[in-house]
Amino acid sequence: MSNLKLIASDLDGTLLPPTKIMPPETFPLIDEMYRRGITFAPASGRQLPNLKELFAPALDKIAIIAENGGLCWHRGEIIYCNPTPADDILYALDIIKREEGLYPLCSGVDCAFYDSDDSKFEEVLHRSYSSAKRVADLNSAVKNNTILKISVWDKLPASEHAAGVLIPKIKGLRTKVSGYDWLDVCTESANKGEALKALLNALGAGREECAAFGDHMNDLEMLEASGQAYVTANGFPELKRLIPNIIPSNAEFGVINKIKELL
């Protein structure tokens, strides 16, 4: 498939297997894509510092879509950034804090901020956030930093509780389930699709020259913005209904094998 210029993939639940360990073939494939003039872009809800750490051996060959499309990094620069206004963040935080078992993490460009001392929450967040700081006053941190989104960790996820209770309560903002136990809140115009379009523009590439992979509803706009869209078999049922182009699951390394096929 020689006409491709960009291949973008979600990470957790998509490229990464359930172990969360990077498939060993990833970096050789990135090298091969780069050799063929194709940019690879991990597109994740994770923060930029964490993604730079994760893809450190290949930073000169890739682009990065971070914070569920809140920003895009390419060739050492942030080429797209769509923060959420502080007043909107504070409004959403007030609603989130009224619910039991929900823990907010406010993601800035270089650091995420939280105020909980729950040990399980801290353990979970440090898996995906390389740069996170506990603060005494979360509202002050929001007012003094550019915040892209709130990531809400659900201590009792899925059907038992679900951070989804927030979706009808938070008005005027984008609230999307971004994984088994996370929900993201951000400005309505921020999503992976808009960041992907900015990256395509920077690369001088068209929609038809892009392939994308995802597994959850926060990937929908990115998949819709690409010429070839694929959902892993383990993906969210509604996403598989909307994008019925199914590849093997993340446990079966469906993305790696599909990229090999495309190449």
Image (cartoon, grey):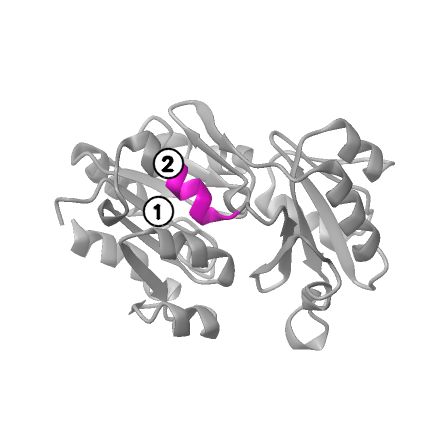
Q: Main secondary structure of the magenta part?
A: helix
Kind of element beneath mark 1: strand
Residue 196 drawn in magenta:
yes
Instruction: Give the crowd class for mark 2: few <14, some 14-19, many >=20 residues within 10 Å.
Output: many
Q: Residue furthest bottom?
A: 159
Please name the residue shown 76% across and 51% down the image.
92
Q: Position of residue 152 (x, y in %)?
A: 69, 54
Question: What residue is shown with label 2?
Answer: 199
Q: What residue is drawn where x is 72% and y is 72%?
A: 161
What residue is pinned by disc 1? Answer: 8
The residue at 56%/39% (across/down) is 47
Number of labels in the image equals 2
Does the magenta segment cover residue 162? Answer: no
Give the residue displayed 39% in from the left and 43% down from the top: 196
SS label for mark 2? helix
Residue 245, percent across and down? 30, 68
Mark earlier in primary sequence (1, 2): 1
User: How far apart, in angstroms, are the residues tagged by discs 1 and 2?
Assistant: 10 Å
Left or right of residue 32: residue 165: right
| Left or right, residue 161 beside residue 13 | right
Residue span colored magenta:
191-198
Residue 59's image quarter?
top left
Q: Residue 15 is drawn in which quadrant? A: bottom left
Q: Is residue 15 visible?
A: no
Asked if labels 2 and 1 touch by Cβ distance under 8 angstroms, the answer is: yes
